Amino acid sequence: MGMLGDMKVADPEIYKAIRKELKRQREYLEMIPSENFASMNVLRASGTMLNNKYSEGYPGKRYYGGNEFVDVIERLAIERARKLFGVPHANVQPYSGSPANFAVYSALCSPGDAIMGLNLTDGGHLTHGWKASITGRFFRSVPYHVKEDGYIDIQEARRLAIENRPRLIWIGSTAYTRELPFEEFATIADECGAYLVADISHVAGLVAAGVHKSPAQHAHIITTTTHKTLRGPRGAMIMVTEKGQRKDPELPDRIDKAVFPGLQGGPHDHTTAAIAVALLEASTPEFADYARQVVKNAKMLGEELMRKGVKLVTNGTDNHMLLINLTPFGKSRGVLAQEALEAAGIVANKNTIPKEPGSPFYPSGIRIGTPAITTRGMREGEMREIAGIMAEVLNQAKDYELPEDAAKREAYMRRYRKEIKANKAIKDARIKTLELCSRFPLYPEMRL
Ligand code: DSN
């Protein structure tokens, strides 16, 4: 019997949707930089009966009985996180990245405190103080930006930090393609007495493999999701560094209390087990090879795209991600390009670019990444092929222009989708992406 047992009979609707999703993942090039394909063992661990347990508290100090084996699992996850990232304290219970970040605020800040993070449309994350996030409403958010060349404006950040004396400074991003300047931000935070929190959600796998600088010597706290380049289950961790402990010996305890009972109830023990499995995998030489290849692939993809006239923010990448600026490339914008790419079998996401002339919902960029396609085994040769396909698709979409009048946009999109699906070059591109996917089978051993 397959992974889903008798679900085909017991719940045919969900069974069918899961089957279709597996087929979609197998037959599309997954290029959203925050997504990846977890190993079978990570999926197996997160699909266990650990789902059934309540374990409020921490190993050895639980509010429920029956946690003998959950304690073993959580201790292993903590130990592996500490070793992999070189930190003295790890909390593996946050449900995901946003609650992890909010737990950090709740451990360190009071409502109204000044906080700083990279502005969302410059590549920062919602939870780093964006106005639509609760973090931009509960705290006095002072965003810093990137410069004209797309690199973080360290001088502006320093000036703002000295003027505003923030309690907490974030260094991290969702759409920044260059190495994060941990050291420079540590100097700024130290100068103004702030806590420096490195949110390495995107690059955690690269940091673990030594392919991206580690923040462990520079930040006081590190947060990360576990499912992006780290290739684990959907979850998150908060780590306190030695520097953090020196600044405040109570910090580990304050973080733990902020997660539980401050913000969360019972940890998701099945996720904790899967995090532990992923951390063990991430400590292997094979994973280091994988992470190196992720970056090589992103660099190659970027070079090839630029050779074909596609403009990239910062003209390239140091990590797993590329940010395409569509403004010089015809009239098409993120939403149109995303749909055209998907019709051709490439899943990417529309994204804001620095000095965004549109809005977060109708942005001017496309964000792509190589973590998932590298997990499938693709290398530089395939990146050249993909760059060719992408450039052709973007070319097909480039003369379409979203109406200024928001009321006309829905009808326009319906017409656009029809035309794009009927477009010969896009149909040809779809044949090529299907062929590429079939050369690099995903989860070949998985039976549903
Ligand atoms: N959704 C994540 C990303 O795509 O980067 C951030 O929360």
Image (cartoon, helix red, strand yellow):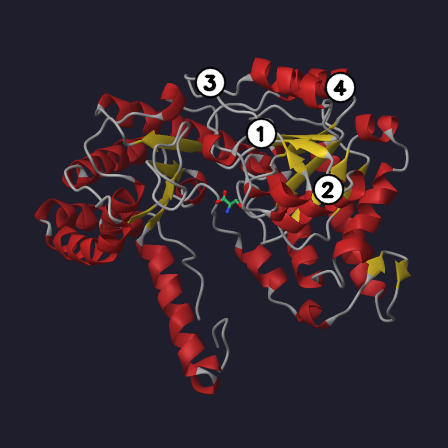
Where does the image place residue 116, in percent across and percent down from the top left?
64, 30
* Cα gap from disc 2 to disc 4, whole angstroms: 18 Å
The residue singled out by tag 2 in the image is 105
* Cα gap from disc 4 to disc 1, whole angstroms: 16 Å
Identify whether 378 is placed above or below 143.
below
Q: Residue furthest left?
A: 424
* Residue at image location 53% in from the left, 57% down from the top: 40
Disc 3 residue type?
Answer: Lys
Classify 10 Å Cα crowding around label 4: few (below 14), some (14-19), many (20 and above).
some
The residue singled out by tag 1 in the image is 143
* Residue at image location 22% in from the left, 49% down from the top: 344
Query: Does the residue at mark 1 contact the one at mark 3 (Cβ under 8 Å)?
Result: no
Where does the image place residue 319, in percent across and percent down from the top left?
48, 28
Q: Quick check: 268 left or right of 371?
A: right
Query: Does the residue at mark 2 contact the one at mark 4 (Cβ under 8 Å)?
Result: no
Where does the image place residue 185, in percent across and percent down from the top left?
66, 20
The residue singled out by tag 3 in the image is 147
Query: Does the residue at mark 4 contact the one at mark 3 (Cβ under 8 Å)?
Result: no
Q: Secondary structure at mark 1?
A: loop
Classify 10 Å Cα crowding around label 3: few (below 14), some (14-19), many (20 and above).
some
Classify 10 Å Cα crowding around label 2: few (below 14), some (14-19), many (20 and above).
many
Q: Is mark 3 within 8 Å of ligand 1?
A: no
Q: Quadrant of residue 16?
A: bottom left
Q: Residue furthest top?
A: 155
Tag shown at residue 192: 4
Q: Secondary structure at mark 2?
A: helix
Decide which of tag 1 and tag 2 comes sooner along the chain: 2
